[in-house]
Image: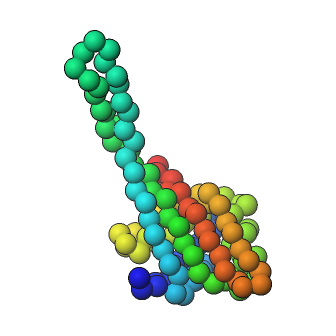
Amino acid sequence: MPSMDFFIRPATARTSADWIRFQNADISVRIARRITRTVVRGGEGDDLHDEGAESAVYTVRGLMAMDLYKQVIEMFRGGQPYIHDPFEERDVKVVFGSLEYDGTSEEFTFELYEDKD
C-alpha cells in the first residue's frame, strides 16, 4: 500500500501555514453506520433501523521527530484539531482517540474520530 502525506492543524489555526505535514504516512479509515435492532417476540423475526448517522475513525501511522511530537501533544490536550481526509479531499474536524509515540524509533500511531456537527 503506498504511503501518502497526512495533514493536521490545531482548531485555533488561522492560515494555511498552520497545517503540519507528515510525509509517507499510512492512513486508513473505517466508516460505520449506526444500526439498531428491534427484536419482535412472537412476530416474524426482528427489524433493523438505520439511524442515518455515520462515524469515521482514522488511523494514521508514520514517523515523527520529537519537535513535531511536542506540537501534536498540544493539539491532543488542547481541543479538536482538523485533518485533511486524503480519500474524500475535505477537511474534517476530529478528536484524538489515542496517540502512541516511541521516542527511540520515532514511530507514531494516531486514532482520530470524526466529529460530525
Q: Depth check: give the residue in front, 42 or 77.
A: 42
For the view shown, which residue lies furthest in the top direction?
A: 42
Q: Position of residue 60 (x, y in %)?
A: 54, 72
Q: Is residue 114 above or below residue 85?
A: above
Where is residue 85 drawn, in percent x and y?
A: 43, 70
Please give the name of the residue rendered at 40% of the width and 56% of the height, measured from the top-left corner. Answer: 31
How are the residues colored?
A: rainbow
The residue at the point 28 percent across, 12 percent down is 42
Q: Quadrant of residue 29?
A: bottom left
Looking at the image, residue 9 sits to the left or right of residue 76; the answer is: left
Q: Quadrant of the N terminus?
A: bottom left
The location of residue 23, given as percent across then percent down, is: 54, 87
Q: Is residue 41 visible?
A: yes
Horizontally, is 63 left or right of 37 in the view? right
51 on left or right of 13: left
> x%, y% of residue 47?
28, 27
Q: How many marks?
A: 0
Q: Residue at x 77, y 80 (%)?
A: 103
Of all residues shown, which one is farthest toward the left?
44
Residue at screen point 31% across, 18% down: 40
- The answer to whether residue 16 is visible is no
| Residue in the foreground of this view, choosing between 34 and 82 | 34
Q: Does residue 12 sit above or below 20 in this rendering?
A: above
Asked whether, in this view, residue 74 is left or right of residue 7, the answer is right
